[in-house]
Image: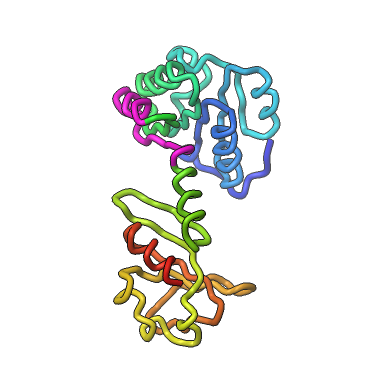
Amino acid sequence: MAEKTKAPTADENVAVIGLGRFGGQVAESLIRLGHEVLGIDEDPKLVQQWSDRLTHVVQADSTDEEVLRQVGLTEFGRAVVGIGTDIEASVLTVLALTEIGVREIWAKAISAKHGKILRAVGAHHVIYPEATMGERVAHLITSRMLDFIELDDDFAIAKTRAPRDAGGRTLAEVGLRTKYGVTVVGVKTHGADFEYATPETIVPHGAVLIVAGTTEQVQRFAAAT
């Protein structure tokens, strides 16, 4: 069993169904965060691969409501369905989880239509990992941003180098919000701790800024740095 960082409460138990690339990564990250994780997959090789890394791993048909009850899914408040390529199995698994009363269901989708079906049968959160990563990489390739995350409602957070003329001046003096509409969330320099930004924060030369705003504002600011 993998080492945990803290003792989890019962409500922190998470079931991860489908231990391929996406589901396996989610499961491993949850373990590192201190959660109890039940992994489920039909592939005996994947079950064997994860048997000593997760809290519990079982080989089972996740589309069968009764099977999910037998392996204890009713004791889990949250479940992640990482099945992607087999759309029928993905949808039937979400439906089965809904039927047994899992409170919060996260499901991977490979297309907009797939995601729409998942929501229709009970998924509370639909994830599009390929599309999200593809868009993120495209933003990084075509801009000077060091990192980029786009959230809902056209809101984005980016890591980008501070403008050259900002070095040694306070954020209030630089006036990035007035010029670009972005809010500076924090400042980071090599070898130093992350610093939450205030109007009085002095921007060191060569610093990296964490900025937030609409996607257009963030892109415009990154292009100007």
Residue 163 x %, y %:
46, 76
Does 117 lie within the magenta span?
yes
Colour approach in the figure: rainbow
Which residue occupies 47% across, 60% down? 143
Q: Does the magenta stretch include residue 205?
A: no
Relative image position of residue 6 (x, y in whole percent): 59, 49
169 displayed left or right of 116:
right
Residue 171 in the figure: left or right of residue 83: left
**How many marks can you see?**
0
Classify the position of the N terminus by image quarter.
top right
Give whichever of 188, 53 is nearer the camera.
Answer: 188
The quarter of the displayed image where residue 66 is located:
top left
Please say if 77 is above or below 148.
above
Between 219 and 167, the one lying in front of the other is 219
In the image, residue 218 above or below residue 92: below
Taken as a whole, is the magenta stretch helix, strand or loop?
helix
Image point (52%, 14%), residue name:
61
Q: Residue at x 36, y 23 (%)?
A: 98
Q: What stretch of residues is rendered in magenta?
A: 112-131
| Up/down of 136 relative to 211, above or below | above
- Image position of 130 with respect to 199: above or below: above
**Spot occupied by residue 92 in the image (x, y as percentages of width and height):** 41, 17
- Residue 159 in picture, x, y percent from top left: 48, 63
